[in-house]
Amino acid sequence: MFSSRVKSSEIQNIHERTLWVLENVGVIFESPDAIALFSRHGAKVDGTKVYMSEALIKQALSSVVRSFTVHGLSSSVEIGGGRPVLTGPSSAITILKKGERATEPTGADFVDTLRLNDSSRVMSMVNSQHIYARDIPIHESPSIKTALALQNSGKPVITYCSTYQESALSLAVAKEFYGNPGHYYALGVGNMISPLKYSRESVGAIDAYVEFAQPIVLACCASMGMTSPVTIGGTLVQTNAEVLAGIIYAQLKRPGLPVVYGNVSASLDMRFATSAIGSYEAIALIPYIKALGEFYKMPVRCGGALSDSKEVDFQAGAESAVAAATTIANGIDFAMHMAGEVNSYNTYSMEKQVLDEEIIERCVFLGEMDFFSGGDTDIETIENVGPGGQFLMEEQTLEKYKESSYIPKLSNRETYSSWEASGGKPIEQAASEEVARRLASHQKPALSPSQRAFTDKICGAFGKKDNS
């Protein structure tokens, strides 16, 4: 259910049909500079449409890298190194708080989101676009929110990747903060428009990351039946062409620039004309997307703890658990939206974040567990206890219980009478208390005097809305 064997013949078929699409259907690039670049490299161009030959595609993809490392103030992540790099929400426009209807977040909510992610044991990066903040001026948000991310977390940062101007502003803040380091200090997550189109803004975002020599994720988000074919096979061919077109452009501009192959497409619910990110079809794409990334020798982004529910309820838990488990089981290298989101990317809940993190910990624990380390089958213990005995007080049980079992923090395993006697606390209340505990105990990273002065100057009053 969570992973499937993808046949090499299927991937080869998708690849060959993708080559046909790129050479005969073409991809729109709304940028004169991009058109000129493709033309110089021998591509056929017609207005804003680019047609790429198999030789050009092979040449450009020969310079991609399989893995790379992004550094933060206190930690670093290797994307493509064999362990999943996970992060939370991105660009949620409302926030859901316990007992309230979803509302527009504030700058203070944004800071709390950063602090919660920084204190997470499973979230590897923080995002300067975690959630929208209504009181941060739009034209200043790339600088302010990037500076706030750097102030409140020592983890590597995901910077803006929307237009050239916003991306360059965000990257410039990160570069200045780290003092023009000689390594990768930021990661962008860019998109294209399905079907088969890179807008002027999309190309500009890529250009900014090329200029700053920082890695970028290029991901499509097609809706099957509306912006891509209704079939999984057709969607895989079209979206593969879309993603490769942007990667080829980035490699032609800067060979060897780290790029992540991304695809977060999903089905369309025809009853409501809405993207169904928690659907079976969205999950069914994941093994194929991973296999395509492996085929092109690039790290892969897809999946998440995805749900279309409007509340932190059974639907949210069920959909998120299946999607998160599928993401982890298929060895996805980089995944956003791994904790805290409902309402199809649009709404964020801190309570759901800590609940999602527990789901992820279970999945990671199961994936990393070596059940037969050293050939251990406990035959001596079985012999000692014998028929009709019990293992509770065995020395081996006491020694190995914690390492052999995942012990949840929020899920309740008491007897009903014990749970009732202790107040009958629902899991949502336990999650709310965990959020409050983590926010209250969070310690910001130690900044140098110059880093503190630099970010304070950018953030202004917004930098004071935290626990400093």
Image: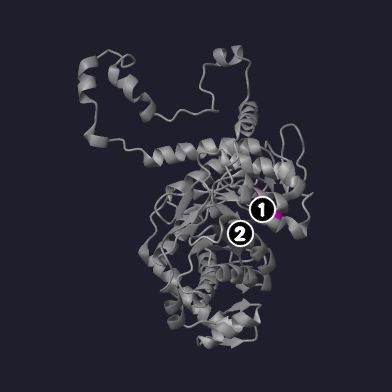
Query: Label 2, on which residue?
Result: 176
State yes or no: residue 52 in magenta: no
At which x and y percent is residue 361? 48, 37
Reply above or below: 356 against 270. Answer: above
Task: Name the amino acid, label 2.
Answer: Glu
On residue 454, the disc is 1
Q: Report the magenta stretch's main SS.
A: helix
Label 1: few (<14), some (14–19) or many (≥20) C-alpha neighbours in 10 Å:
some
Check whether the beta carbons of the residues at disc 1 and disc 2 lie within 8 A of each other.
yes
Which residue corresponds to the image point at 44% horizontal and 69% vertical from the top-left?
A: 64
Per the image, label 1 sits on a secondary structure element best described as: helix
Q: How many marks?
A: 2
At which x and y percent is residue 42? 50, 88
State yes or no: residue 147 in magenta: yes
Which residue corresponds to the image point at 62% horizontal and 77% vertical from the top-left?
A: 29
The range drawn in magenta is 144-148
